[in-house]
Amino acid sequence: MEKKPIRVVVAKPGLDGHDRGAKVVAQALRDAGMEVIYTGLRQTPAQIVEVAIQEDAQVVALSSLSGAHMALFPQVVKGLQAEGLNDVLVLGGGVIPDDDIPGLKEAGVAEIFTPGTDTRDIVKYIEAHFNGGK
Amino acid sequence: MFDSEKIAQIGEAKAKWQENTLAKVVKKNPERQPEFKTDSGITMNTLYTPEDVADLDYANDLGFPGEYPFTRGVQPNMYRGRHWTMRQYAGFGTAEQTNERFRYLLDQGQTGLSCAFDLPTQIGYDSDDDLSQGEIGKVGVAIDTMADMEILFNSIPLDKVSTSMTINAPAAVLLAMYIAVAEKQGVSSDKISGTIQNDILKEYIARGTYIFPPAPSMRLITDIFAYCAEKVPNWNTISISGYHIREAGSSAAQEIAFTLADGVAYVQAAINAGLDVDKFAPRLSFFFNSHMNFFEEIAKFRAARRIWAKIMKERFGAKNPRSWALRFHTQTAGSTLTAQQPNVNIMRVAFQALAAALGGTQSLHTNSKDEALALPNEESVLIALRTQQVVGYEINAADVVDPLGGSYYVESLTNQLEAKAMEYIQKIDDLGGAPNAIEYMQREIQASAYRYQKSVENGETIVIGVNKFQMKEEPPKGLLKVDPALGESQKAKLKNVKESRDNAAVEAALARVKAAAEGNENLMPPIIEAVKVYASLGEICGVLRNVFGEYRQQIIF
């Protein structure tokens, strides 16, 4: 039976303009058969939640390289939860120091992918989450 | 450069060598890869001989340093007179903290300043704006009003130090603040020197800190050209940047092509605005990346100089040799630095710095080893500065002009990069010039970025510590952290300024900025008046946003 593709929103919260990583990840997820929406730059947490609702997203992948992740990623999680979207898998990526990772996970970001990550590992992680890796 | 008979003899001898000597060895021990290619798609042959540069015409293609077409360098004796300017990009947190870092770098022998601004500043928002939250003081220093700028340059004599400011959409406002601060120090605007990046096209293409749509943005830029030609003659009014285009993933050929195409657009806009090309073109400067493919990078810098000289002379009819000469700043490639085994980054940076020196750069920033992890701390900034000092002072690489000129390989690469870049420039011209080719360039860059990522993932491209020679590591220690409380103190500072300034004068000054924006008088004088009465960056940009509107990005992926 044909399975429905996993729906992913790739988003750039904050004012950061570095979108090379976000676009490479977006393209890799699309090549892996997922349905990917990229928000473009300068999204507020509220706008990202809005897109996630509109696009019926199962995954929200956040990218920040400007050091704003501690302020912005948790706000996206909170916003999703406030809309009752507790099942949406929130992922983060970018220049994120190791010290910050436990705090982000505690705030509800499921996993953080730092520089040097193989995009196939991101694909595997998402697929495992939704169908046990099969 | 060689007579055709000799070339033919060399060709025959080479064919024999390939057949008798090379083929046997390769048959016994196959080469590491089926083919060797640069990231611009240029095939790297086993060996280069005079055959590969048979058509090179010394006088026309290379010439002498300091003369057209400047392939060999923009000064006749290059670094034998003075080294490149060693200029580390720095800025974080508050104006006080950045001022301290600036003074530290100057004490360590740095010869120019390079200021990083935080994202709210770069996008024209004050620290108290909702959109600024989480970003204040993070990637650079937060500047809201001239009061911050006074602290930033406290005890730094602006008639002696040149300052490069990475500021684009609101460049006019930051330049105005710099002029005003210098004036307060008793330094008139004809005595200050430095650079504003002021390159909006690459913001649309690759860097993302745009505010206004292209037409009013180009007008702001040509207003700055015109104002500085009269009042700030030693200021580099733009730094046309390939750096971020490369960081976004482009190849070397795309980097120079897209940058020079942007340059063409600025020159054309200024000519259309009625400026004399030889009045403003000598103050144009460029900014390139120094990446991993060592020889291709050196060839890239040489090719860029030759292409620009031809464009300025032939296409725009510039007569002043200073209008033909492409002067550039270089930064080593941040995107090549790894979070894994960060000390290895010191070596990467050293080779990239050497390529920049051999390519004839006018100034250089060497990246810090910890940039894939956090903002650089003081120790890693010092190593980065020392790295370029080794290149400049210890290895005698700076003692001869264009030492790789005449290398069959480097000359061949220079020619091929020029040809590839000219194809792209032609394509962009066909699309109506750079402002009309933004999405085209974005697609090209993105395709290159994705190709690169795949080549790392399938092992074709080796990155030490990422896909080869990995090892278990302890998490790095001592990373720089920007205090999150800083945002609040910066907001308090702004509130203070807003309460203590003459608000009627601010209103009046902002009204004059608005009137100038609506008409066509030069915007610089009213912006300078506004910053002097402590109108904030966000207020001035807010007025301009209302008049000009805002750019909306096309989502290309």
Image: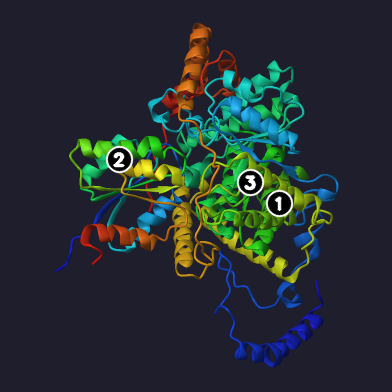
Q: Which secondary structure lies at badge 3? A: strand
Of residue B430 and residue B555, the one placed in the foreground of this image is: B555
Residue A44's image quarter?
top left
- Report the residue marked by disc 3: B287
Q: Position of residue B130 (x, y in %)?
A: 38, 26
Q: Is residue B365 visible?
A: no
Give the CA separation, mark 1 to mark 3. 16 Å
Question: Image point 43% across, 50% down: which residue?
Answer: B439
Q: Position of residue B303 (x, y in %)?
A: 68, 58
Q: Which numbered disc flags the more N-terminal residue, 1 or 3? A: 3
Q: Which mark is residue B242?
A: none
The label nearer to you, 1 versus 3, is: 3
Chain that bears disc 1: B
Q: Which mark is residue A48?
A: 2
Chain that bears disc 2: A
**Amino acid type at mark 2:** Ile
Of residue B228 and residue B272, the one placed in the foreground of this image is: B228
Chain that bears disc 3: B
Number of callouts: 3
Question: Image point 76% across, 26% down: which residue?
Answer: B159
Residue B504 lies left or right of residue B291; in this view the side is: left
Q: Is residue B328 visible?
A: yes
* Residues at marks 1 and 2 touching, judged by CB atoms closer than 8 Å: no
Q: Which mark is residue B309?
A: 1
The figure's colour scheme reads rainbow
Give the CA separation, mark 1 to mark 2. 47 Å
The label nearer to you, 1 versus 2, is: 2
